[in-house]
Amino acid sequence: MSVYVFTGPTISPTEAAGELDAVYLPPAAEGDVYRVTLQRPQAIGIVDGYFQSVPTVRHKEILWAMSRGIHVFGSASIGALRAAELAAFGMEGIGTIFEFYRDGVLEDDDEVAIAHGPAEAGFLAGSEAMVNIRQTLRKAELLGVISTEVRAALEKTGKELFYPDRNYPGLLRCASEHGLPEADLTRFRHWLPEGLVNQKREDALTMLRLMRRRLGEGLEPKTVSYTFEHTSMWESAWRQSGDLRFDSNAEPIVVALEPLLDELRLEGDHYGQHTLMALERFFAIQEAERLGMTVSNERRRKTEIVFRRERGLVDAAEVERWMNDNDLNDHQFDALMMDEARVRWVRQRVQFASLSCLPEQLRLSGDYPRLVARAVAKDRLLESLGLKNPCLEDADLTENQLLRWYFEELLRRPVPGDVNSYARNLGFASPDAFRRALLKEYLYRRFEHQTKQMIEPTS
């Protein structure tokens, strides 16, 4: 199970963890839901979020998360507000406050806004939410602690206060200054410690319990009825958002995309190469999903086996080290293998089509003249020597020696554990075709060198 929940002053991560096993993050700000979506969770819960000090969480990133199959729940605070605004698109709102916003009983953001301390202080609340004050006053009215008129007057007084200044002592002081009956205010003041309502906390707990139940029942990927539009504004937003990582203490760290890309761009041609491969990967995954390809457990397992062999990841410790180096947890690694299975499946289906386009790509890259000239020269030299179809005896090598020459001397890397898979991934028709190509390359290099020595002038 992979779940992320944004919370803070409404309910502490410690208390929330008693209701739902999840990764708890600080209040959501712009870009946070996008970054969490990159972790590929099953569900995201939004309780608290920033309103004024930093840009608030975007509607678009929530829509993008749901379009990626992730369930997004909201309650209590900014989560309730966003859920009411996006209910028609599939965001699931929970609790009384969500219902108030959905039904138009509440409209203003300041109904749930409060002042609070920093993360280091546990987001300690420094004011009271207006929606909590409303619910407390209505409870007091129902119990006969205050009259309807006093309740309405106290609501009006509370609403007129700037949200960071809202608290019960301040509310009662202003009410007294406005001439409300002291007897009612005194009675309310004495009742308040045991009677106040924290509607935001109650709604947050309700959401966490519902998420726990839904996940326990088996939560299928989210389906939506809309098509997500990749607008220029969205591209600008996600490029600025970066990625979410966790340090050794499980503290979240935002890794900005642009600095990472700058490092790649400074390596010259690598940027274009990786961009092209990323584009291929994107369309392969999209095509697999369009064709309804499902990744079975067996296919995923075989994909991981091949993936590990290609990288020499023999045991679990090496896999874990690779995951740590690449900032991946178990869930993300599993998602990577699922996508890798889709990509390899599509590559097999469209191999002929992609090969037919390779000459064009080589012409555009500038590699065509060099590769064609070398292929022709190799064929002519080997044919002139009667080595058009050579065998290992012609090179006086064993198969292992040939493989070590190619991988260790030419490529400066170890011989793969599964040479046959390596050959298939390079598009060779068979392992024998790969070994024949290596043998021709070896012989061509040897005899080309000898030929050059024979024609070079001596002093």
Image: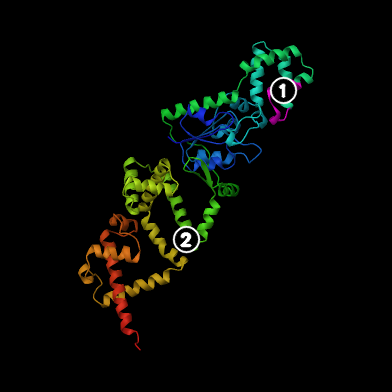
Q: CA distance from mark 2 to mark 1?
A: 63 Å
Residue 346 in percent (x, y) is at 38, 50
The one nearer the camera, 3 or 323, is: 323
Residue 316 image-quadrant placement: top left
The one nearer the camera, 425 or 397, is: 397
The one nearer the camera, 11 or 310, is: 11
Q: Quadrant of the C terminus?
A: bottom left
Report the mark closest to the observer, 2 or 1.
Answer: 1
Determine crowd level at label 1: few under 14, some 14-19, many 20+ residues with C-alpha closer than 10 A. many
Residue 331 in percent (x, y) is at 42, 40
Q: Secondary structure at mark 2?
A: helix
Amino acid type at image mark 2? His
> Looking at the image, is 283 positioned above or below residue 83?
below
> Looking at the image, is 360 positioned above or below residue 93?
below
Q: Secondary structure at mark 1?
A: helix
Residue 159 image-quadrant placement: top right
Task: Indicate left or right for 416 with 23 as reference.
Answer: left
Instruction: Give me the residue at 30% from left, 83% from top.
Output: 454
Q: Which mark is residue 314?
A: none
Q: Earlier in the sequence, mark 2 or mark 1?
A: 1
Labels 2 & 1 near each other (Cβ < 8 A): no
Q: Which region shows up in magenta?
A: 161-174
Q: Which mark is residue 270?
A: 2
Rendering colour mode: rainbow
Q: Which residue is mark 1?
A: 171
Amino acid type at image mark 1? Leu
Residue, far bottom? 459
> Looking at the image, is 136 positioned above or below residue 98?
above
Residue 167 highlighted magenta (yes or no): yes
